[in-house]
Amino acid sequence: MPSVTHDDAPLLADLIPWSVAPLRPGRAWPTAPDAASLKARWDALLKADGPDREALFEPTRARTLYSAVGQLPGRSTGTEKLVRASGPCPEPVRVLAAPFDEQWLIPDHRLIDTARPELWRVAEERQVFVVESAEDGQGPLLLATSLLPTFRPGHIRPLFRRPGGAEPNLAPGLLDHLTARLGLSPTPLDVLAWVMATVRLGLSVPLTEDPELWSRGVDLGHRILWLMRRDGERPKLPGGRRPYVRAPLPSRPRTLDYDRDEETLQVDEGRISPVPPEAWDFEVAGVRVLEQWLTARTAEAAPGTLAAIRPATWPQTWTSELLELITVLALLAELRPRQSELTVTSAITTAELRRAGVLPVPPAARRPASVLDHQEEGPEGQFALL
């Protein structure tokens, strides 16, 4: 049978219908590559009074020291206005602050212009957030993460509509239709793995009724998901190709360069090699991932701002994270030829899904589910009516 064409394939927006617009943090200082800096920034904010506290906070139209907002779902933070707030910093949480860049965030609704509470309600260990990362083909079209994404990509599509891996965010009837056509029993994570392996420009996703092809695509997609989510066993390159620190990184690195012939990443006088060109050239939406990651940890912040509070020296944990990031990017780059070679035949087309009643999806499938199983505190200690 001929391979499925772009026009025949269903859209990602129909297969994983509920999506949420990206968060808008509004200010950079509540996010940092290390948690200790965030606690020091919070303390500095609360020690300041009057105009000094306001200047440090960096108010916007959406958030000022006088904003009254409720808690983020699942977070026990204060809800009094920040102008009179006191107490310790809310415990920072791990987030995806940029493509492949895991950082820390103070999870306080008063600090975030548009926090998207519907995402916080379903953020837990079994969740997978699919992020529309690029439309031009410069790098992966989709990212997947177990952490809440806080940067400005395209839409965010949670795999599950409720906590605990309940109610997959898939077109109603899609799993049953795939089971009948494939003679297999795909899980929601299998469907996502297939999506990650086969998604095309325009965010269309060709489907197949060929069980052998499906299994190959799912295996490839699970490998992509494992590398992107980085949960469980840590990825490693084969011996001889693993990056090592050849010369220690300086305490306050400022310059970055790459020697393509020597496959060496140079951070001031520090040296890491081998760093494959494929890892150095890895881009998302036209931005080189390694450069963006390092810039987030080396760029100077304006003096007197909360963002200027940062580690005095380069932490050893950052070096470990950098070595793992190089490994992940190199391994993902190796998978691209296999993705390109995955020609989808025996297509399940959009027209077929319409005849089966899978499409169009009902409007309710594009809206968040009601997931409240506890009371959430609203502004100034009142209960939120949700």
Image (cartoon, helix red, strand yellow):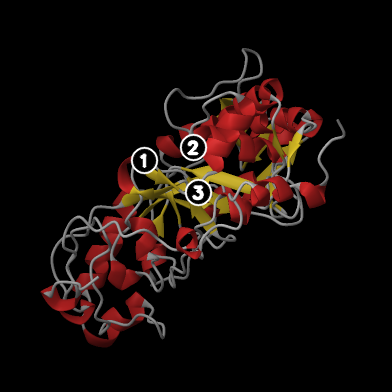
Distance, label 2 to label 1, CA atoms, is 9 Å
The mark found on residue 77 in the picture is none
Residue annotated with mark 3: 172
Amino acid type at circle 1 is: Gly
Pinpoint residue 72: horizontal percent, then vertical percent: 27, 63
Sequence-first tag of 1 and 3:
1
The C terminus is located in which quarter? bottom left
**Label 3 packing within 10 angstroms: few (<14), some (14-19), many (20+):** many
Please tell me which of labels 2 and 3 falls first in the chain.
Answer: 3
**313 left or right, relative to 201:** left
Q: Which residue is drawn at 16% across and 74% down?
A: 85
| Mark 2 in CB contact with mark 1 (< 8 angstroms) | yes
Please give the residue where the numbered disc 1 appears in the rendered image: 165
Residue 221 location, quadrant: top right
Picture residue at 22% right of the left edge, 64% below the top = 43
Which disc, if any, is residue 188? 2
Secondary element type, mark 3: loop
Image point 55% across, 57% down: which residue?
361
Nearer the camera: disc 1 or disc 3? 3
